[in-house]
Image (cartoon, grey):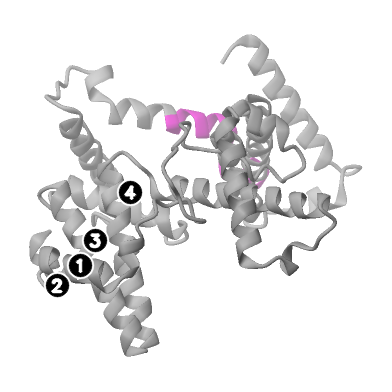
Amino acid sequence: MSNASADKFTELQDVLRTLLGPDGCPWDRAQTPASLCDYVVEEAHELARAVRCGSSADAAEELGDVFFLLTFIALLYERQGAFNTADVFERSRLKMIRRHPHVFSDAVFASVEEQLAAWEAIKKSEQAAAGKPAGLFGGLPASLPSLIKAYRIHSRAAGAGFTWNSDSDVEQQAEAEWLELLDAFASQDKSAQEHELGDLLFTLVELGRRKGIKAGAALDAAAARFLGRFAFMEEQARQQGRDFASLDMEEKNTLWEQAKREEYKATPRDREENNTGRARVECNTDGAEDKRDVDRAGEERDPALRTGERRDALRNGAGRGDDREAAR
């Protein structure tokens, strides 16, 4: 941290101390570390959105909001006598040194995978020394968003050698899970449908992880594309003096295709600048233009996927997936 940054951090702490002082803000004075948790989660999501949108100005603002809340919480703990901000920084510094022995010591790793395995081993030893659960998933926060949690589970399981042998094995597993979901839909058993949909999503998260794709970010991008295109359709309908809901499906599809064409013509920066006021839903997080034919969720169209022909092909090629646990 530069001297200028350190000075600004001190000034931020001074602002917080004023807010928490006798003549400060009643709302701030009523806060506790626990009461600020939801705000931290909310602002962290705002920060992730700004980063994924590629807006450095928004990222700077959202970083400031997150940093303010973290400083706020640290100061509240300091007032309780639990610890101070310097303690937080020192713990983080020492932790990073411990977990990077190949940088700060003489350890040598033959591959990134070996280094990550060592990282997990170091974490496990830290947890054991602190009296925390030493299991592979003992430190996994229960409150993580589901897609992030699934990604972390797969990553840790893979680090322990409990995963499919190849990407093609996972692809076959995803196809098998899709067939099981279709069977569940045919059975009208809601519990089975939820079970099989969960299995399919869980498997797709692992397939994405192996390809270097985080499912949460990919789904967020798909949702943003949908919202941006839908906003475009509504605007086009308004310009025609019509209510979007009153359009027939053919007219709506025509507007949808127009929205996609407009999206593909624009650069990421153009999309950001041209859609101010759309709650930033237009941001494309994958950084590249995929000009394949896509459906409304941003997925590649495969009409046969919805037919018995495709279903039979999957059954003949993928198996039923009953041995999926043995395949891991």
Spatial distance from mark 1 to mark 4, Cα to Cα? 42 Å
Q: From the top left corner, tell me how far across and down residue 72 is, in percent.
A: 68, 41
Circle nearer the N terminus (3, 2): 3
Q: Is mark 2 on a helix, strand or loop?
A: loop
Q: Mark 2 points at which residue?
A: 320
The residue range painted magenta reads 77-92
Position above or below: 9 against 225? above
Residue depth check, mark 1 versus mark 4: number of the one nearer the observer = 1
Nearest the viewer among 300 and 116 is 300
Q: Do the residues labelled 2 and 1 touch (CB within 8 Å)?
A: yes
Q: Mark 3 points at which residue?
A: 174
Spatial distance from mark 4 to mark 3, Cα to Cα? 39 Å
Choose top left, top right, bottom left or bottom right for residue 110: top left
Residue depth check, mark 4 versus mark 3: number of the one nearer the observer = 3
Residue depth check, mark 2 versus mark 4: number of the one nearer the observer = 2
In the visual, does 291 lie left or right of 86? left
Circle nearer the N terminus (2, 4): 4
Choose top left, top right, bottom left or bottom right for residue 317: bottom left
- Disc 3 marks which amino acid? Ala
Circle nearer the N terminus (1, 4): 4
Q: From the top left corner, tell me how far across and down residue 219 is, in percent.
A: 47, 51
Q: Mark 1 points at which residue?
A: 176
